[in-house]
């Protein structure tokens, strides 16, 4: 079953530095001379990272601290033999993926039979070429389809143990009172890069499906409830009052035995107030046992918690579910499918208006209706006409905030809301406290420069998964932070959420918004909020779309069918208008190097439909000046630096 956190094409975004991690190998042998042979043999191996241990107990502790793909284990060790070592780590759910390789000088029939029965990955006799055979067995795992899932299982287990999940708070605004009525707590994973130690914030789309698959989701949901309870207690202590906050619970969490008691314990231990806490359940995942689910909701409301139905109108909408849960529901959140239908299909306007009235009248005491994913000010205008007593949540109003930012936003929500309704939705309200603790507010347009420090954010909008994959591989290797969307509608939402400075846009995406229309909309939005224009590159199969993209304001136009040689000539023409600019010699050096390898790349281009090229073939040459550095050359004019980006488009799918 597709997770509600999956993208529309059923895929889940991957964490690039996990995908690129070399195979991690642990060698365990109590003979230090053998370990030295391993270290010397694998010292120059750039696709493997090998660590050794001469003590099996120490090795087991190391497996808890670091991720490993393979454990190469000696059969005959004094403290515990190889079989006992493998049995010890395979008792741990998060270590079951580690592939064991047993090596030994004892090749008797009993040992071999035991290896087969114990499901060892392979068995290697300790002879003259045993290291080569171990290497061959390890490398067979390099392209394992399950490797990324195994990594996610281990790193999620570690994240729970190390408290790496944090909460951000997205405000829910009440239209009539013009203030923050509540917050939704959203999970973020602060994941350290195993190689560099740098911490990256990972969005839930990337890890929640794996947490559900591997059984971590209930513990994660309860941990998030504990964090929110602590933040609420701190807000109350500092401000004398707090505000309602809702926490998302997976449908799988509701199958947990004694859920209500665990929730009560977590809230009590962390100082939360049940009357100010809510549980959101998503309607986009089918509820397996509706009767048990109803019982769980009843118990949670008896604790004093509010219940919120999320994603109403998505995949599993049914009158039966609605009638079962409505006695316990205080708020209903309408899914983006219905909300964005107003913009894409005018006839949805009346349907949404009727849906809101219908939902409000289901209970005698009424229930609050929240419109989620409001990323466009036009939605605010339209929905205000339908019903002025609605609640709104989305990037057109406010982005997810840290705990401290959320507290400050609530204190000044009236002023912020006035800015939102004044049609400056993309301005950030920044807060600072002066020495006497009075509040200062200043609005600043959210317009990060394309070539500022840090990774450049790039958004790929195309409904062909192969095209997106090829482009993503290319740009991630060049140091870009990449986001994908598979439709024009999804692309607009991702544009507002991700705030990319570079976009690659396809024209025709089935019946969805045309790429040129999306380009025009983005250019209009940039002018409206005073943002610095980003680079928009049209990337399409349709020659006829050129004029439409030019009219819409695209900077560059590429046909997917163009050969690499044709692209090079086109790009040389673009940059030649500024050939006196300092630093252009480095660009010419890069271009000459690229032309020297043109034949090889063209041959890859001709076979691209049958298979993806090797990932290493897409890496920049080590001696290349590097386009990313060229782009950041401050001596080049801004116009030239903007256009030079097109050179990164020559290796597309």
Image: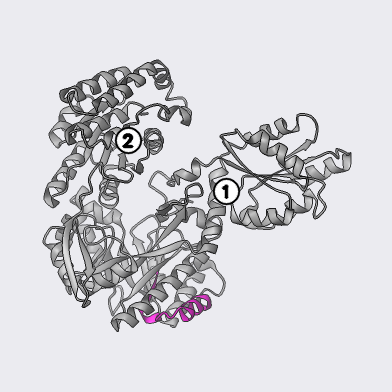
Q: In this rendering, would 630 be left or right of 602?
A: left
Instruction: State which quadrant residue 425 falls in.
Output: bottom left
Sequence-earlier tag: 2 or 1: 1
Q: Is residue 364 above or below residue 539?
A: below
Q: In this rendering, would 414 be left or right of 355?
A: left
- Nearer to us in this view, 261 or 57: 57
For the point 65% across and 47% down, the residue is: 98
Residue 498 image offset from top left, x and y in percent? 30, 50
Disc 2/disc 1 C-alpha distance (Å)? 33 Å
Q: Which mark is residue 150?
A: 1
Q: Which mark is residue 628?
A: 2
Most extreme residue toward the bottom is 240
For the point 45% across and 45% down, the residue is: 14
Q: Which mark is residue 612?
A: none
Q: In this rendering, would 432 be left or right of 478?
A: left
Residue 591 image offset from top left, x and y in percent? 31, 22
For the point 42% across and 50% down, the residue is: 6
Q: Is residue 380 above or below residue 46?
A: below
Q: Please check the rendered image and state whether residue 459 is part of the magenta-colored stretch, yes or no.
A: no
Q: Is residue 359 visible?
A: no
- Nearer to us in this view, 412 or 6: 412
Residue 171 image offset from top left, x and y in percent? 28, 67
Identify the magenta region.
Answer: 261-279
Circle 2 SS class: helix
Circle 1 SS class: helix
Are discs 2 and 1 less than 8 Å apart at CB? no
Q: Which secondary structure class fits the magenta region best? A: helix
Residue 432 image offset from top left, x and y in percent? 23, 68
Q: Nearer the viewer, mark 2 or mark 1?
A: 2
């Amino acid at each position: 079953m597709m997770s509600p956190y999956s993208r529309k094409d059923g895929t889940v975004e991957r964490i690039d530095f996990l995908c690129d991690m070399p195979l991690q190998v642990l060698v365990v042998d109590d003979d230090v001379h053998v370990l030295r042979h391993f270290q010397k043999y694998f010292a120059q191996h750039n696709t493997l990272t090998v660590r050794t241990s001469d003590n099996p107990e120490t090795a087991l502790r190391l497996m808890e601290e670091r991720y490993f793909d393979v454990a190469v284990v000696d059969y005959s060790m004094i403290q515990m033999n190889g079989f006992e070592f493998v049995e010890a780590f395979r008792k741990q759910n998060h270590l079951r993926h580690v592939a064991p390789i047993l090596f030994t000088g004892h090749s008797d029939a009993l040992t071999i039979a035991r290896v087969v029965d114990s499901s060892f990955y392979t068995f290697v006799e300790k002879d003259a070429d045993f290291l080569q055979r171990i290497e061959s067995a390890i490398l067979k795992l390099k392209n394992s389809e399950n490797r990324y899932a195994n990594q996610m299982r281990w790193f999620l287990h570690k994240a729970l143990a190390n408290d790496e999940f944090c909460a951000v708070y997205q405000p829910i605004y009440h239209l009539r009172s013009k203030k923050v009525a509540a917050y939704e707590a959203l999970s973020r994973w602060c994941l350290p890069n195993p190689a560099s130690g740098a911490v990256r914030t990972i969005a839930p789309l990337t890890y929640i499906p794996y947490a559900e698959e591997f059984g971590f989701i209930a513990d994660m949901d309860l941990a998030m409830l504990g964090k929110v309870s602590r933040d609420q207690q701190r807000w109350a202590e500092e401000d004398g009052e707090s505000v309602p906050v809702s926490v998302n619970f997976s449908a799988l969490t509701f199958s947990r035995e004694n859920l209500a008691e665990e929730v009560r314990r977590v809230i009590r231990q962390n100082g939360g107030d049940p009357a100010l806490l809510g549980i959101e359940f998503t309607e986009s995942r089918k509820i397996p046992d509706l009767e048990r689910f109803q019982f769980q909701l009843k118990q949670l409301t008896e604790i004093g918690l509010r219940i919120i139905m999320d994603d109403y109108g998505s995949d599993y909408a049914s009158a039966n579910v609605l009638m079962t849960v409505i006695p316990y529901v205080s708020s209903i959140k309408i899914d983006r499918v219905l909300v964005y239908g107003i913009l894409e299909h005018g006839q949805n306007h009346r349907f949404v208006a009727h849906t809101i009235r219908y939902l409000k009248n289901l209970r005698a005491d009424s229930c609050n209706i929240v419109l989620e994913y409001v990323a466009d000010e036009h939605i605010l205008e339209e929905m205000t006409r339908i019903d002025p007593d609605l609640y709104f949540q989305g990037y057109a109003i406010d982005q997810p905030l840290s705990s401290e930012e959320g507290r400050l936003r609530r204190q000044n929500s009236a002023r912020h809301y006035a800015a939102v309704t004044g049609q400056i939705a993309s301005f950030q309200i920044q807060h600072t406290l002066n020495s006497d603790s009075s509040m200062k507010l200043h609005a600043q347009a959210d317009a990060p420069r394309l070539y500022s420090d840090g990774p450049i954010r790039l958004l790929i909008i195309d409904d062909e998964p192969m095209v997106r994959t090829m482009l993503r591989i290319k740009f991630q290797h060049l140091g870009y932070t990449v986001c994908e969307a598979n439709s024009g509608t999804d692309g607009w939402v991702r544009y507002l959420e991700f705030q990319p400075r570079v976009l690659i846009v396809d024209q025709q995406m089935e019946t969805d918004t045309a790429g040129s229309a999306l380009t025009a909309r983005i250019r209009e939005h940039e002018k409206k909020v005073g943002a610095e224009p980003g680079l928009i590159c049209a990337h399409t199969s349709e020659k006829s779309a050129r004029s439409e993209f030019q009219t819409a304001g695209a900077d560059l136009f590429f046909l997917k069918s163009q050969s690499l040689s044709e692209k090079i000539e086109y790009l040389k023409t673009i940059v030649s208008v500024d050939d006196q600019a300092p630093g252009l010699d480095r660009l010419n050096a890069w271009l000459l190097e690229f032309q020297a390898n043109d034949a090889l790349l063209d041959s890859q281009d001709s076979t691209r439909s049958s298979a993806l090229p090797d990932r290493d073939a897409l890496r920049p040459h080590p001696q290349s000046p590097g386009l990313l550095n060229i782009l950041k050359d401050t001596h080049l004019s801004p116009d030239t630096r903007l256009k030079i980006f097109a050179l990164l488009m020559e290796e597309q799918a």
